[in-house]
Amino acid sequence: MQNTQPSQDILIQINNLSVHTTDGATLVEPISLSIKKGQNLTILGETGSGKSLLAQAVMGALPKGLTVKGQILINGKTLHDGQGELDEHQFAKLWGRDLTMLPQEPVRSLDPTMTVFRQIWESLHFVKRVDNSAAKDTTLRTLEQLSLAHAKDYYPHELSGGMAQRASFAPATVSGAYMVIADEPTKGLDHTNKIAVVDMLAQVAKQGGCLLTITHDIEVANRLSTDNDLLMVMKKGKLLEQGQATDVLQNPKSDYAKELMSANPATWTKADITPAETPLLTLKDVAISRGNKELFSGLNITLHAGQAVGLIGDSGIGKSSLGDAICGLINPSKGVMTWHTKPKRHQVLKLYQDPPSAFAQNITLGTLIDDVVKRHHLDKSQIAPLMEALQLHPDLLHRTSESVSGGELQRIAIMRALMMKPVLLFADEVTNRLDPITQKTTLDLLTHACRTQNCTLVMVSHDHDLTRHYCDTVVDLTGYRTV
């Protein structure tokens, strides 16, 4: 590959970069940008706007079948110049030591056969070449910084979504890469841990590297933005505006950016909700354990038909595990759960916070939806209006789960669940991949559909304003924490 001579301060540069499908459809229109040493670039935009595709192109890790036009330079070396599929081997030489990416789905970056401690230690010992003793000490310090010291011997399947997000951060960054791409690095985290991860990411630029962050969280964008930093706003594959981060955040020019900046759940007016009266499920003195650890105990609550119940609490406190118990996937370690009207098995559903775990990877989404329709004798005519209401393009059904954004996949999971006419739906952080505008549209539809179908909705969220807006009852598991 040829070498060029850009400014010595520029670490990442792309010129007229665009992303296309093999049949010629444009997914990302031509974009140019450069990120210097000591600089953060934050990309804001709606789900499916092409943010992740742009980041994957910079990383040299686009899904197979997508082609790139334009130029990509990493630390002065041209790794792509022209058009066609990216040469992954050229980029791979930089992965780990120079360039690293925090993926949107943390479970995909963690080895399911290794403990959290071992995965961080290996990055230090084998990639950064730190001796065994020093690698162990650094691993322990890193786990403490991420509030994961207690989970050092956990395997990925034993972690909550928020814990997995923090755990994936560590092995990707400890090996010394000075160019970091972070794709939605704070989704699923409570406020305290979100700030901790953002502050650790900010150290990359402060230490002379550069950081490219994809997020829909305005608080994250603000915290990563100084007068030296940059911000871009994207929508439907187009760059709407870019500039100095503080200027764009405080004085957005495009209508979409203005709407995005003002989409704050704390400002929404709460609708009057008629209290639900028909009991569906009663939990009495329920405790939940994972392994030998009791997460919480003494929970007493009755869920009513058509009721929206919010579930809040710190990451790892047992919110997802409670959902598993309600859905019959695990048994409570103590207490009794009594159904007043026993639903059919397929009418108690869970929407996962990591939607890829709910879809086969190599089969088109349309085929997967058709299989559900045939298996449960559903009305196929529901698909088109639900997709329209969820702002999903019909063409997405011709693609696999790996070739759509996380937010698009989550909305397809919501569509599939609503088609089943559920009696109880456990929604585990289902909008943490969505920008604030799409988030409101999606939750408006979800809560309205559940009330219309007399379906009980149990909604997990770290956003307390969001939870209080949509739910008539909110349960904080912090009050039931086992010390």
Image (tube, helix red, strand yellow):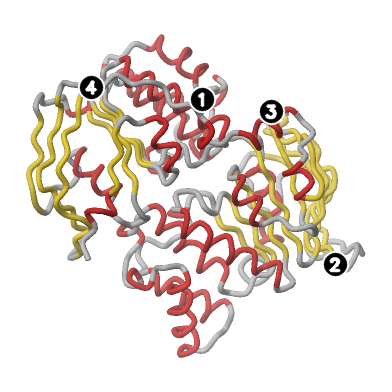
Sequence-wise first label, 3 or 1:
3
x and y, in percent, of residue 18 in the image? 77, 39
Q: Quadrant of residue 149?
A: bottom left
Q: Which residue is mark 3?
A: 23
Marks 1/2: CA distance? 42 Å
Marks 3/2: CA distance? 38 Å
Q: Which residue is mark 2?
A: 9
Q: SS at mark 1? A: helix
- Does the image show residue 426? no
Q: Residues within 10 Å of mark 4 (few under 14, many from 20)?
A: some
The answer to whether mark 4 and mark 2 are in CB contact below 8 A is no
Amino acid beneath label 3:
Asp
In this view, 422 is above or below 139 = above
x and y, in percent, of residue 452 in the image? 32, 14
Q: Which mark is residue 276?
A: 4
In this view, 57 is above or below 163 = above
Marks 3/4: CA distance? 51 Å
Q: SS at mark 3? A: loop
Sequence-wise first label, 3 or 2:
2
Sequence-wise first label, 4 or 2:
2
Marks 4/2: CA distance? 61 Å
Question: Going 64% across and 64% down the picture, which residue do you hit?
Answer: 202
